[in-house]
Image (cartoon, helix red, strand yellow):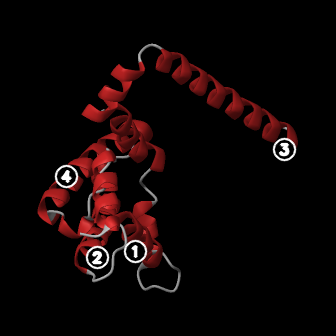
């Protein structure tokens, strides 16, 4: 055994985060989870914009198909690129003006409101705490609460300053 392999294995044991290799994912399982996410997205879009879910369904189906196609490419192509990168690339390609059917795709997807779709995903991301995160919070104690409040306050105030400055520049 070489010295490098010993150092690498001990380093890997110390790192708490293990990235999932998308070349080994269960496509059927992820496709099912995407169906659930799409259903939640349709409901959120309906609540936020008042758009009938049946009218928004073709756009959601397009988003679903592009997402699944991105996962398939990430799974089966011989070189690694994350599924989100493949999905983004496919979404760009199907909406390019010279691609046949891009106008139809844009017409159907325009019915969907991005913020309405992103809000449930971001809320889940904020609520999904892992055992490692609970361990970190337990070890950090009450001090991390103060740091978190300061970070949130600073981020909010920074956003206020930037928004105020840009509104003053535009004269509004």
Q: Dot 2: within a 10 Å radius of its alpha carbon, few (fewer than 14), some, or many (20 or more) residues?
A: many
Q: Give x and y (percent) for residue 56.
A: 34, 54
Q: Give x and y (percent) for residue 113.
A: 45, 49
Are the residues flagged by discs 3 and 2 in contact, CB closer than 8 Å?
no
Q: Which residue is mark 4?
A: 33
Q: Dot 3: within a 10 Å radius of its alpha carbon, few (fewer than 14), some, or many (20 or more) residues?
A: few
Q: Residue 170 has which mark? A: 3
Are the residues flagged by discs 1 and 4 in contact, CB closer than 8 Å?
no
Are the residues flagged by discs 2 and 1 in contact, CB closer than 8 Å?
yes
Q: Nearer the viewer, mark 2 or mark 4?
A: 2
- In the image, residue 125 sits, relative to residue 146, either above or below, namely below
Disc on the earlier residue, 3 or 1: 1
Task: Name, please, the residue furthest toward the top.
Answer: 142
Disc on the earlier residue, 2 or 4: 4
Q: Residue 90 has which mark? A: 1
Number of marks present in the image shown: 4
Distance of mark 3 from mark 2, alpha carbons? 44 Å
Give the SS element for disc 2.
helix
Q: Nearer the viewer, mark 3 or mark 4?
A: 4
Q: Residue 73 has which mark? A: 2
Are the residues flagged by discs 3 and 4 in contact, CB closer than 8 Å?
no
Quadrant containing the C terminus is top right
- In depth, the one of 2 and 18 nearer the eye is 2
> What residue appears at the point 14 percent right and 63 percent down from the top-left corner?
26
Distance of mark 3 from mark 4, alpha carbons? 43 Å
């Amino acid at each position: 055994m070489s010295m490098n392999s010993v150092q690498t294995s001990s380093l890997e044991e110390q790192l708490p985060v293990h990235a999932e290799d998308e070349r080994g994912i269960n496509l059927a399982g992820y496709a099912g989870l995407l169906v659930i996410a799409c259903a939640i997205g349709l409901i959120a879009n309906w609540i936020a914009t008042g758009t009938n879910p049946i009218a928004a369904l073709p756009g959601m189906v397009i988003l679903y198909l592009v997402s699944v196609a991105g996962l398939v490419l990430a799974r089966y192509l011989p070189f690694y690129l994350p599924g989100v990168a493949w999905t983004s690339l496919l979404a760009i390609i199907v909406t390019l003006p010279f691609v046949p059917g891009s106008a139809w795709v844009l017409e159907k997807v325009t019915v969907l409101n991005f913020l309405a779709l992103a809000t449930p995903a971001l809320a889940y991301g904020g609520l999904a705490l892992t055992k490692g995160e609970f361990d970190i919070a337990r070890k950090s104690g009450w001090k991390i609460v103060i740091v978190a409040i300061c970070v949130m306050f600073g981020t909010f105030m920074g956003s206020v300053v930037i928004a105020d400055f840009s509104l003053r520049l535009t004269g509004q």
